[in-house]
């Protein structure tokens, strides 16, 4: 069952997280703020994709999500510095968690965080790893996060074409993620973005975005009356393309 979609006067939110054909679901996601009954002010949406043997992946992703939401709840604010602060806090929580036992010593996680202030009409986001945020305006992809991955570095250097992503053996090799103080890297917008009515956002793990092209995301958006319907339309496409070893896939849709 999907969690029920949450609504506020300005925001609609839906999310899904599936195990695919893997033994466990190492993705995690959650939200705090607008859309939660009784809460006002800025909202925080967060999604993580964990990695690590012996259950370390699901521990890492849930640790990261919990750290972000608890920290944000203690001081809700919507600005680039706060995004980077939240991601750094999550990284330190994962590093601390690695010391709990040998089983999770190598756990890692991606992270993508969106902060939105519906009252002021502003939004900002940041990430580490290859979980993505897509920003849609008037039904078209306007921006998306840049993966911290070997393959993305090859694209940037002109050594690879984004169209060859699927099936590339280096597509899941990350250059940055949560789980290390020395090699930790995070990116965020330089300043808040002013929202317009009809703006849409998609946070998703690589198991969700990899089977879908941006055109397919846009087509699904045009035909969907609600954020939940949008996610379900895209999920049907993922299921149709599923192969042996189907990865976990998770997504959050936020409509303004």
Image: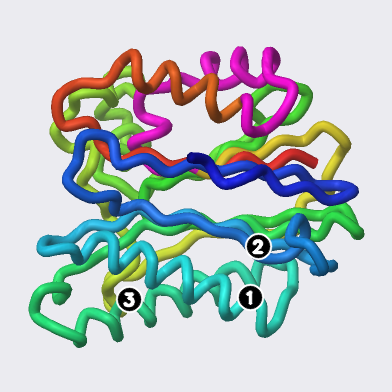
Residue marked by disc 3: 94
- Quadrant of residue 242 within the rendered picture: top left
- Spatial distance from mark 1 to mark 3, Cα to Cα? 17 Å
Q: Which label number is shown at residue 72? A: 1
Side (left or right) of 121 relative to 87: right
The magenta segment is 204-229
Q: What secondary structure is marked by label 3?
A: helix
Q: Residue at x 74, y 73 (%)?
A: 77
Q: Is residue 212 magenta?
A: yes
Please give left or right for residue 137 compared with residue 97 in the image: right
Instruction: Return the residue at label 2.
Output: 44
Q: Is mark 1 in CB contact (under 8 Å) with mark 2?
A: yes
The picture quadrant where one finds residue 141 is top right
Q: Nearer the viewer, residue 2 or 30?
A: 2
Judged from the image, the secondary structure of the residue bearing numbered disc 1 is: helix
Report the Cα–Cα distance between label 3 and label 2.
19 Å
Disc 1: CA contacts within 10 A as few (<14), some (14-19) or many (>=20): many
**CB atoms of marks 3 and 2 within 8 Å:** no
């Amino acid at each position: 069952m999907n969690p029920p979609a949450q609504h506020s006067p300005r925001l609609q939110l839906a999310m899904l997280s599936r195990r695919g054909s893997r033994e466990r679901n190492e993705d995690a996601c959650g939200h705090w703020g607008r859309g939660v009954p009784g809460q006002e002010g800025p909202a925080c949406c967060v999604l993580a994709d964990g990695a690590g043997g012996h259950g370390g992946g699901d521990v890492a992703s849930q640790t990261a999500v919990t750290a972000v939401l608890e920290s944000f709840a203690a001081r809700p604010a919507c600005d680039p510095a706060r995004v980077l602060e939240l991601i750094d806090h999550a990284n330190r929580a994962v590093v601390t968690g690695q010391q709990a036992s040998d089983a999770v010593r190598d756990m890692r996680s991606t992270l993508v965080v969106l902060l939105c202030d519906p009252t002021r009409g502003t939004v900002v986001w940041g990430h580490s790893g290859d979980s993505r945020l897509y920003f849609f305006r008037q039904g078209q992809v306007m921006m998306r996060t840049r993966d911290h991955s070997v393959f993305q570095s090859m694209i940037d250097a002109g050594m690879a074409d984004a169209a060859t992503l699927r099936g590339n053996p280096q597509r899941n090799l990350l250059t940055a993620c949560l789980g290390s103080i020395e090699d930790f890297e995070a990116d965020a917008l330089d300043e808040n973005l002013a929202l317009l009515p009809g703006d849409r956002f998609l946070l998703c793990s690589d198991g969700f975005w990899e089977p879908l092209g941006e055109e397919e995301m846009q087509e699904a958006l045009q035909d969907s009356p609600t954020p939940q319907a949008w996610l379900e339309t895209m999920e049907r496409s993922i299921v149709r393309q599923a192969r042996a070893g189907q990865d976990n896939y998770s997504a959050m849709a936020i409509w303004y």
